[in-house]
Amino acid sequence: MTDATTMRADDLAALREETAAQLAAAADLRAWDAVRVGVLGRGGRLTALLKALGALPPEARRERGAALNRLKAELEAAIEARRAELEAAALEARLAAERLDVTLPPRPHPPLGAEAGAIHPISRTMEELVAIFGAMGFRVAEGPDIESDWHNFGALNIPEHHPARQDHDTFYLPPGPDGRRPVLRTHTSPVQIRTMLTQPPPIRVIVPGRTWRADHDATHSPMFHQVEGLVIDRAITLGHLKGCLIDFLRAFFGIADLPVRFRASYFPFTEPSMEVDIGWNRRTGELGKGGDWLEILGSGMVHPRVLANCGLDPREWQGFAFGMGVERITMLKHGMADLRPFYESDVRWLRHYGADPLSPPSLAEGV
Ligand code: PHE
């Protein structure tokens, strides 16, 4: 080996060592990239050595070329290894900086009326209705807010020019393909029809839901809520209706001896029909005593024509239905005078009348 060759071998060794030192000193990916370019880049040190090969005589070129290629592979590996190291370190640093302490204790549940959320009284009443009727074996049924004229009126035995249609102050929508105007349902009774059409008897459902009438004052809102009840079975009588509603009203208002009165009335879809009153004191508003009567809901035995409209044979199946206003029974239960705050989202009102979300209604504790 000549002196010149040794010298050149030494400059390769120097390049190897210096690159290793530079890589070790590169603290981040930016510094690392500068080292990489300084060695392997277009003007890099190794690139320059490779370019210089062409000037050597063939014998020396082969030997030198092989040495340079080995060095190149070595340096590329070292550079790549350092990159992996730096990337792993950067990830570690990020994980450490963004660490979440999952051992922090939860924030204490603030007392109701402070920052805690509360269940809206309408929702709460619906939960109570589901709890009470659920215990009697009722399931919840639903239907759309936009109804066909037939579901809302026709199938319920309310004929075309019947005054009951005017009574309902109906919101009409533009006519559909059949030329008839859909309506915003004026009561939850169309869900009686939908239920009888889709499930075979026996049926026991309640229908809590939104209803609509063009009416607005202290006790009426264009959007309000009703709950419907429907029972269809063999040999259902007025006695079942009375027992069911008396039990419900006493459970809901929490008054074991609440007086309940059934008064003959008229609805096109029930026969006979009855309005139901509860005892109260007109002067003080107190429920349960005082000798006055307050109308609270409508009910009756499902009209044979309604059963027939739903494909049920009235000689085989009978039943009863009832419907009441959710706002109305909520206002009576909690002594509220005005219905409008239900929809005004006034946080002070909601805090006062809202229910604790952590204790849903249960019959064991009394709803
Ligand atoms: N749908 C009636 C109303 O809105 C209430 C009702 C329901 C009456 C079921 C009898 C039977 O006034």
Image: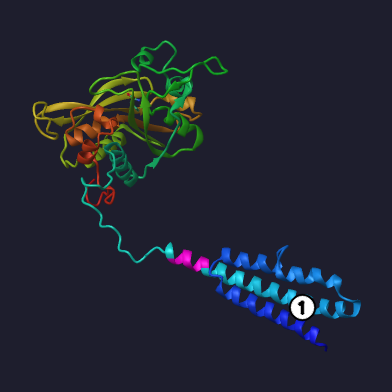
Residue reaching furthest to the bottom: 1
Q: How many numbered marks appear?
A: 1
Which amino acid, mark 1? Arg
Residue reaching furthest to the front: 3
Confirm if mark 1 falls within 8 A of ligand 1. Answer: no
Q: Residue at x 80, y 68 (%)?
A: 51
- Name the one closer to the observer, 131 or 263: 131
- Name the one closer to the observer, 102 or 170: 102
Q: Secondary structure at mark 1?
A: helix
In the image, the segment drawn in magenta is 90-96
Does the magenta segment cover residue 94?
yes
- Name the one closer to the observer, 67 or 135: 67
Q: Residue at x 46, y 26 (%)?
A: 146
Mark 1 nearby-residue class (10 Å; few <14, some 14–19, many ≥20): few
> Compared with residue 303, is residue 43 higher up or lower down, i.e. above or below?
below
The residue that label 1 is drawn on is 70
> Compared with residue 286, is residue 265 higher up or lower down, i.e. above or below?
above
Ligand 1 placement by image quarter: top left
> Compared with residue 57, is residue 226 higher up or lower down, i.e. above or below?
above
Q: Residue at x 40, y 32 (%)?
A: 318
Q: How is the image coloured?
A: rainbow
| Residue 167 in picture, x, y percent from top left | 33, 15
For residue 10, what is the image quadrant? bottom right
For residue 5, what is the image quadrant? bottom right
Q: Quadrant of the N terminus?
A: bottom right
